[in-house]
Amino acid sequence: MNARPTLAAVLIVKNEADNLAACLATLDWVDEVVILDSGSTDATATIAQASGARFFVNSDWPGFGKQRQIAQSYVQSDWVLWVDADERVTPELKTSIETVLAKPRVNTVYSVPRLSWVFGRFIRHCGWYPDRVLRLYPKTLTGYNDALVHEKVHLNKGVKVKKLKGDLLHYTYRDLEHYLVKSAGYASAWAEQRQAKGKSSSISQGITHALGCFIKMYFVKAGFLDGKQGFLLSVLSAHSTFVKYADLWIKTKTQPPTA
């Protein structure tokens, strides 16, 4: 009888002292926890080390995709489960993962449904649920791409994607300021990535995409069923969409004054 493969929970973090302990408490059943920090100035390192996690630092930020690649390189276990510090593994999801490991499939990766808590409510519409993300796979099978932001797991030919049951709870934003700061960071990275590929934008594109985002989230994806939070999230997402196109326009179409 083959032994059950070992499992590592892997996190990339920065200044997650408010979240980390609660996250790690839902991972006390895995064989290994690997945490790669990108230069925290709070108690993140202390909390991580006190938990028994294997803690590493890479403060020379290379982008999300490459940072995840570095983190995976430290894994000693057979399988990888990716978790962010603001996420929590539910008992049902834990059971689903253990079922997979009891009889693992060949050339298969697994997606998990993510349920996000935003401004006082779990968002079940707006196109935000089940928000399936690829998070579980054999370490030697695959890994993340090089994207600066919105990184993805490589899916080579022949690899199958199976769905796990059980939600991954996602406590996204502390408050509006946290949302705006985080959104601005993503927008800047997105624009930088597009600029590097020779892409450009315009203000009119930003307006068009922003309006489309609101209509899709609030009406097509029934965000109105999420109450005031659904409306606010749809407005903010439209704003974030406009900002990333505007940032790309600024980066590619405007020039500083000549001396």
Image (cartoon, rainbow, N blue to C red):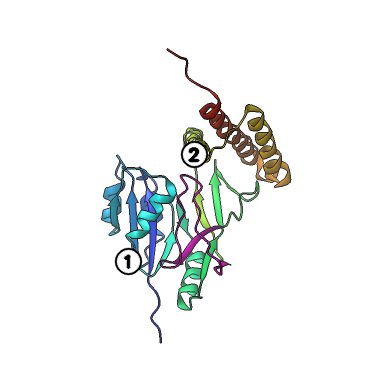
Q: Residue furthest bottom?
A: 1
- Sequence-wise, the earlier of marks 1 and 2 is 1
Instruction: Provide the secondary structure element on which disc 2 rests.
Output: helix
Crowding near the residue tagged with mark 2, few <14, some 14–19, many ≥20 C-alpha atoms within 10 Å: few
Q: Quadrant of the N terminus?
A: bottom left
Identify the mark at residue 196; answer none if there is no mark: 2
Instruction: Kindly identify the amino acid type of the residue bearing the numbered disc 2.
Output: Ala
Disc 1 and disc 2: Cα gap in Å? 34 Å
Instruction: Provide the secondary structure element on which disc 1 rests.
Output: loop
Q: Position of residue 205 (x, y in %)?
A: 65, 32
Any part of residue 22 in sight: no
Name the residue rendered at 51%, 72% in the picture.
107
Name the residue rendered at 34%, 58% in the picture.
34
Question: Overall secondary structure of the magenta stretch?
Answer: loop
Q: Quadrant of the C terminus?
A: top left
In the rendered image, the vertical position of residue 78 relative to residue 69, given as above or below: below
Q: Position of residue 11 (x, y in %)?
A: 39, 54
Identify the mark at residue 76; answer none if there is no mark: 1
Residue 117 on the magenta span: no
Left or right, 23 with respect to 48, comes to right
Q: Which residues are magenta?
A: 133-162
